[in-house]
Image (tube, grey):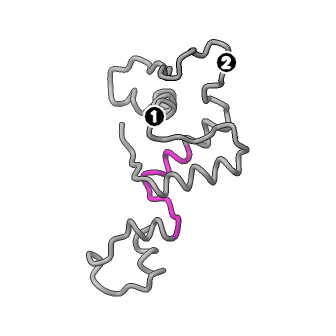
Amino acid sequence: LQKRMLRMCENFHGNIRNLPTQPLFTKYSMLRADPVYYFKLLLWIHKYKLYPTSSGNSSRYSIRNPTLRLPAIRTNYGRQTLNFQTIKMLNRTDFNVDFYKRFPVFKKECRNVLVSSGFSFAL
């Protein structure tokens, strides 16, 4: 449905295999279906302030990057829980957003990062 809408915006009437849609998602700044999950998860993390705050027990050395401990799980069903996905998202090193910004600015920054990157849903 999203790709069909992009083709309509581009007024493309040829073979659908001849029009790659990845550049069009970036051009129109549309989120694909996969990153919508991450977008909603990041907004939920920001809303409930689940991100780690800088506290007095931070390490002296900048090379140490403390990560949150993932809960022990035994099944793929456990990987789908909100607790697991939240901690996994906060531990990502390839995705840097500033959780201390105001909500509208944070939302816009997350959207721009997800549109420009190749994030996809993975367990």
Relative to 19, residue 12 above or below: below
In terms of secondary structure, what is the magenta stretch mainly?
helix
Q: Is residue 36 inside the magenta stretch?
A: yes
Q: Position of residue 4 (x, y in %)?
A: 41, 74
Classify residue 2 as left or right of residue 110.
left
Classify residue 29 as left or right of residue 18.
right
CA–CA distance in space, label 1 to label 2: 20 Å
Q: Amino acid at mark 1?
A: Arg
Can residue 67 be seen here?
no
Kindly identify the residue that appears in the image at 45 percent across and 34 percent down.
92
Quadrant location of the N terminus in the rendered image:
bottom left
The earlier-in-sequence mark between 1 and 2 is: 2
Magenta-colored span? 28-40
Q: Secondary structure at mark 2?
A: loop
The dot on residue 92 is 1
Relative to 101, residue 15 above or below: below
**Residue furthest toward the top?**
57
Q: Residues within 10 Å of mark 2 (few under 14, many from 20)?
A: few
Q: Position of residue 73 (x, y in %)?
A: 37, 20
**Residue topped by disc 2:** 55
**Camera-nearest residue between 108 and 35:** 108
**Camera-nearest residue between 94 and 86:** 94
Classify residue 102 as left or right of residue 30.
right
Number of numbered tags placed on the structure image? 2
Q: Amino acid at mark 2?
A: Ser
**Camera-nearest residue between 95 and 16:** 95
Q: Position of residue 104 (x, y in %)?
A: 71, 51
